Image: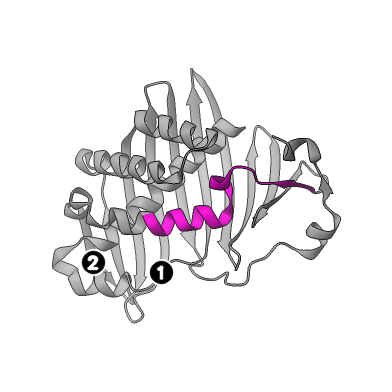
Amino acid sequence: MRFKKVIAAIALAAGLTATVTACSQKPSNEEVIKQVNKHKIQSFHMTQDMTTEVNGQKQAIKQEITFGGNPMTAKATSSAAGQEVKMWTSGTNQYISAGDADTWYKTKITDPTQSADKIAKSMKNSNNILAANKEIAKNASIKEDGDNYVITVKNNKDTNDAISKSVYEAITKMGNTNQADQAKEIAKQMKIKKFTFTETVDKKTYKVKKLTSKGTISVEGVITMNFKQVMDHINGYPHLKVPADVENNAKLLKSLNKK
């Protein structure tokens, strides 16, 4: 389960990395880019459809994730092999419910890289670090579509290599924990084989409306992942928080807290 989380996190990082870099590096559209970058992504909703193949065995994974609130809170639902897991994360607390049962279990987050706040901060830091990626900028195009600007990155080997490198550099900023170290090792061996990206921006406000990315990731030829991510409702969850009934009724899992 932890290994799958690491892979999913890398796929997410790839999508977010390209999102910001594409927006930041189109010289012929400097004013548009400048205005778009004034609007930070503080909260969002995202769906992920992934198919992973490890040593010849395939598995489909679907995830729905919402980030927002203060402190930063995350709501997630993940389904694979007919098993659904629901989760809330806020501060150092994590709440998990599996299957059809409405029973929630509470654990303490001992790995700081897994907190919603840390993930959100990593996203913002990555945005600044990756803004100067010229390879991605060269292959980004902007066009007008009614009331919107549409920023597009088409599949290109130089772009894919640049994103792979950028993802690794972003993950090295996570710190040193067992899971972070595992993510770094996987990211070091990761290659993006195929990637396309589209971002829709409101022409009047320059606010991002929707992000869509598709791609294929390979790790040392052992793991192959095809993914599609759609991010919408940008900055639509400023008050996201864990429901009171989940907080008040969750059962404490002491055994997990000791790890």
Q: Position of residue 62 (x, y in %)?
A: 58, 43
The amino acid type found where label 2 is placed reads: Lys
- Image quarter where the C terminus lies is top right
Q: Which mark is residue 143?
A: 2
Rendered view: 242 above or below 64: below
At 42% across and 63% down in the image, what residue appears?
210
Q: Which residue is mark 1?
A: 40
Q: Residue at x 48, y 17 (%)?
A: 55
At x 21%, y 75%, the residue is 31
Relative to residue 105, is residue 194 depicted above or below? above
Query: Image point 56% across, 29% down: which residue?
Result: 59
The quarter of the picture where residue 124 lies is bottom left
The amino acid sitting under disc 1 is Lys
Q: Residue furthest left?
A: 28
Q: Position of residue 15 (x, y in %)?
A: 40, 49
Query: Mark 1, mark 2: which one is toward the viewer?
Result: 1
The magenta region covers: 105-125
Q: Quadrant of residue 116?
A: bottom right
- The residues tagged by marks 1 and 2 sit, at their Cα atoms, a distance apart of 21 Å
Judged by its main secondary structure, the magenta piece is helix
In the rendered image, residue 109 lying in the magenta stretch gets the answer yes
Q: Is residue 199 left or right of residue 133?
A: right
Task: Name the residue furthest top.
Answer: 55
- The local crowd at label 1, few if under 14, some if 14 to 19, many if 20 or more residues have their Cα within 10 Å, is few
In the image, is 127 to the left or to the right of 91?
left
